[in-house]
Each structure stands twice: as structure tokens, then as C-alpha cells.
């Protein structure tokens, strides 16, 4: 055993190769799809001097993400609890400060971002991953304790609830909804026979089901006078978007439909999209998928979705092969985080659920989300490395 403890294992050779390869393909390929989707709007809509503006920035974000990933895959998971709690508290305090600042000095509380380096830094994106780490490390040690306080399991849930409320008060409904679903589903993955835990799990699942039903069918039940009273409530009216072409959400989704219809099975070929010529707002962020389908076809769109499903499968497999409960919960949380962004973005773009303005993983332009996404996959790689080291030790 002493001899095994002295062995230095080749960290990078123990990476999960399918996840690594697919992550690289998605991030690099996504950057050039962002260039294609944004080259027109960068100059004509946003007034930048170069059509490469968003490509350059996205490449910078990717480089920052992979530099951070190099540190993450070398950093042992046993230190996650203290670090994740520390970072979570810093970001919650940051959100509270932003809320107070906007309440006092802004006519409307609608910003949960920090302006820096010529861009917008979104604390919510980082907080999602930090809380996944904290939930995993907390419940990993909590489940192994012989004596625990009866209600101590709610500590991470309180922090999760506070974070989601602050994001919601800041006006970011999409991120708040994803956070609630993310934390609820991650908590459901925690194994426990405790009666109180089972009750909270039941309430969490019931709440999510009710929320999905409201999102899906709320416009049929809630009076139109109430729906029309608020821009956010009006998003619940999502069916038949082309009948509401003059409305913001109807206009966007309908133009997305037009892009997909233009593309057909095989697309109009790269660079030949019509909808990116300022017909489709946010063509390089929330609505990049219709542009991709317009140019590359429905076949490529289906391949992208299948590739997403494969990535989720590989992360789940790492979670299943993990004997450490903390690491298993973290992997489940990250796979849920990834899956929710895909579902909410594509669901909104395709008119299946209300539009919330959530980016599509790897393909949508965005600094905070791009960096945190790459770092979250690095966490999975670190866990996979520790799984492999343990397997080699026991071989």
C-alpha cells in the first residue's frame, strides 16, 4: 500500500477521452459558428469595426476556461467543501450588494451583472457550479455521519433558495428557474433513508412538476388581462408564435421557425443564412440553433442534439463509476446543469416552452457561461482521474 501511495500517476492520461474530445470539438466548432452567426450583426446592429468581434472574444473566453480547467484537474476533490462554501458566500454577498445598489441607484432592478473588461460578468453562472460543488461535498459527508442534526440537511437548500431569490429579484427569470430546477434535481440524487429528506424530495419533485405544468399550460388558465400586465408573464403565451409576429417573443420564435424551414434537411450551406441579416435577434446567443439549422440543415441539428445526449451519458457514467458520494453528486449536478440549459434553450427556441433567454451550451456566445461550462467539465474530468487512480491502486 505504501508503494502504491508513492506512485505518480499521469494525470492527463487518465482524462475521460470521449468527454475531452467532444468538449474540444464543441467549444472550437461553436466559436466559428458564433462568427458565422454574428458577422453581420456585429457590424450593422452593434456597430463594431470588425465582423470578427464576437469570435475574438469567444476565443478569449475559451482560452480562459481551459487555463482554469488545467488547475481544476490537478486540484484534489477533498478540498471542495471549504472552497465551494467560501466562494458561494462571496458570490451571494456580491448578489446582495448588486441588489441593494440597483434598488438605491437604479430606476428598475434588472441587473445581476458586473461590468468589467468591456463586458458583463454574471455571478449567477459561477454560483450555479459552486453550489453544485457545495451540495456534493456537504451531502457526501452528511450521509456518512453516524450522528447528525435532524434538520441539518437543509443548510445547502437555504443557500440555494437565497441565491435563486436574489437572481429572480434581479430580473433574470431564466437563470432563477434553472437554479431552482438544478438544485431540486441535485438534491433528489442524494441517497438517504431519512424521513424528513424523503418529504423534502417529494415536495421538490411535486414543485417541479407543478412549475412545468404552469409553464406549459399557464396561458390557458391565467386570465389574459393578468398575462398582458407584465412582460415576463406575457412570455407564458408562447403557442402559435407566428400569430403574434409583432410581439417580441412571437417575432423571435417565428423567425427561428423560418430559419429552420429555410434550411430543410441539408441546409443552404455555411454563410448563406438569410435570417442572420438582422431578421433574427440574438442570432449569435439564444437563437444560434435556428441559424445553424438554416445553414447546415436539420440533419446537423439532430446530430448536435445527439452529441449533447452522448455527453450527458458520459458524465452520468462517470457519476455511476464513482464510489465517493461527494463526487457522484457533483457529476449528477453538472449533468443536470448541462441538460437543463439545453432543454430550456431549445424548448424556448422551438416553441415547446416559454422563451427565457438561456444560452445553448458551447454554441451560444457568452463569457461567464462559456468559462463556467468548461470549468464544470473539468470538475468531471478531475473526478474521473480520481476514479482511475483508485482503480489502478486496487488493480
Image (cartoon, rainbow, N blue to C red):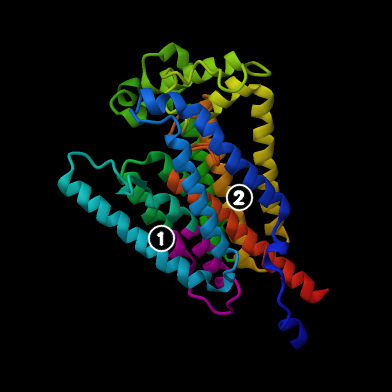
Furthest-top residue in view? 243
Residue drawn where x is 61% and y is 41% of the image: 26
> Residue 384, image x and y in percent?
68, 62
- Pointer 1: what residue? 158
Q: Secondary structure at mark 2?
A: helix
Of the image marks 2 and 1, the number of the one nearer the N terminus = 1
Q: Nearer the viewer, residue 122 or 73?
A: 73
In the shown orientation, is residue 233 left or right of residue 211?
left
Q: Nearer the viewer, residue 165 or 151?
A: 165
Task: Return the residue nearer the eye: 211 or 394.
Answer: 394
**Prevalent SS, magenta region:** helix
Q: Residues within 10 Å of mark 1 (few under 14, many from 20)?
A: few
Q: Residue at x 60, y 38 (%)?
A: 29
Is 312 rendered above or below residue 82?
A: above
The tag on residue 117 is none
Residue 355 place in picture, x, y as percent:
45, 30
Mark toward the viewer: 2 or 1: 2
Identify the residue at the far front of this view: 49
Residue picked out by circle 2: 335
Q: Quadrant of residue 328?
A: bottom right
Residue 28 visible? The answer is yes
Q: Is residue 191 visible?
A: no
Q: Position of residue 91 (x, y in %)?
A: 36, 59
Magenta segment: 130-158
Quadrant location, the N terminus? bottom right
Specify whether residue 178 is painted magenta: no
Q: Residues within 10 Å of mark 2 (few under 14, many from 20)?
A: many
- Considering the numbered disc 1 on the image, is that residue within a helix, a strand or a loop? helix
Q: Which residue is rendered at x = 58% and y = 13% of the image?
A: 262
Q: Position of residue 13 (x, y in %)?
A: 72, 63
At a point 53% along the width and 73% down the height, the residue shown is 79
Amino acid at each position: 500500500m505504501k508503494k502504491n501511495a508513492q506512485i505518480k500517476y499521469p494525470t492527463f492520461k487518465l482524462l475521460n477521452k470521449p468527454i475531452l474530445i467532444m468538449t474540444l470539438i464543441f467549444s472550437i466548432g461553436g466559436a466559428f459558428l458564433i462568427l458565422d452567426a454574428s458577422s453581420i450583426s456585429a457590424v450593422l446592429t452593434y456597430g463594431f469595426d470588425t465582423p470578427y468581434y464576437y469570435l475574438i472574444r469567444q476565443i478569449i473566453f475559451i482560452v480562459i476556461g481551459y487555463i482554469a480547467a488545467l488547475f481544476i484537474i490537478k486540484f484534489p476533490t477533498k478540498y471542495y467543501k471549504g472552497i465551494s462554501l467560501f466562494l458561494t458566500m462571496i458570490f451571494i454577498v456580491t448578489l446582495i450588494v448588486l441588489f441593494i445598489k440597483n434598488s438605491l441607484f437604479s430606476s428598475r432592478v434588472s441587473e445581476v451583472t458586473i461590468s468589467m473588461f468591456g463586458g458583463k460578468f454574471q455571478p449567477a453562472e459561477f454560483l450555479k457550479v459552486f453550489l453544485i460543488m457545495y451540495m456534493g461535498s456537504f451531502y457526501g459527508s452528511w450521509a456518512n455521519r453516524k450522528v447528525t442534526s435532524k434538520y441539518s440537511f437543509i443548510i445547502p437548500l437555504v443557500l440555494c433558495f437565497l441565491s435563486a431569490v436574489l437572481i429572480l429579484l434581479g430580473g433574470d427569470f431564466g437563470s432563477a428557474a434553472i437554479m431552482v430546477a438544478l438544485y431540486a434535481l441535485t438534491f433528489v440524487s442524494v441517497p438517504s433513508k431519512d424521513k424528513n429528506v424523503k418529504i423534502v424530495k417529494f415536495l421538490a419533485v411535486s414543485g417541479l412538476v407543478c412549475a412545468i405544468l404552469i409553464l406549459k399550460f399557464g396561458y390557458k388558465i391565467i386570465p389574459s388581462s393578468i398575462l398582458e400586465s407584465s412582460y415576463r408573464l406575457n412570455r407564458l403565451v408562447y403557442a402559435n408564435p407566428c400569430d403574434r409576429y409583432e410581439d417580441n417573443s412571437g417575432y423571435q420564435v417565428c423567425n427561428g421557425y423560418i430559419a429552420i424551414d429555410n434550411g430543410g434537411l441539408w441546409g443552404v450551406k455555411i454563410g448563406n443564412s438569410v435570417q442572420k441579416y438582422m431578421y433574427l435577434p440574438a442570432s449569435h446567443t439564444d437563437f444560434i440553433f435556428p441559424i445553424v439549422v438554416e445553414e447546415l440543415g436539420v440533419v446537423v441539428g439532430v446530430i448536435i442534439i445527439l452529441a449533447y445526449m452522448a455527453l450527458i451519458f458520459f458524465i452520468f457514467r462517470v457519476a455511476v463509476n464513482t464510489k465517493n458520494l461527494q463526487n457522484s453528486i457533483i457529476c449528477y449536478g453538472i449533468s443536470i446543469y448541462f441538460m437543463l440549459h439545453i432543454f430550456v434553450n431549445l424548448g424556448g427556441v422551438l416553441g415547446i416552452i416559454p422563451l427565457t433567454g438561456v444560452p445553448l451550451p458551447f454554441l451560444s456566445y457568452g463569457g461567464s457561461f462559456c468559462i463556467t461550462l468548461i470549468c464544470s467539465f473539468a470538475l468531471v474530468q478531475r473526478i474521473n482521474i480520481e476514479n482511475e487512480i483508485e482503480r489502478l491502486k486496487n488493480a
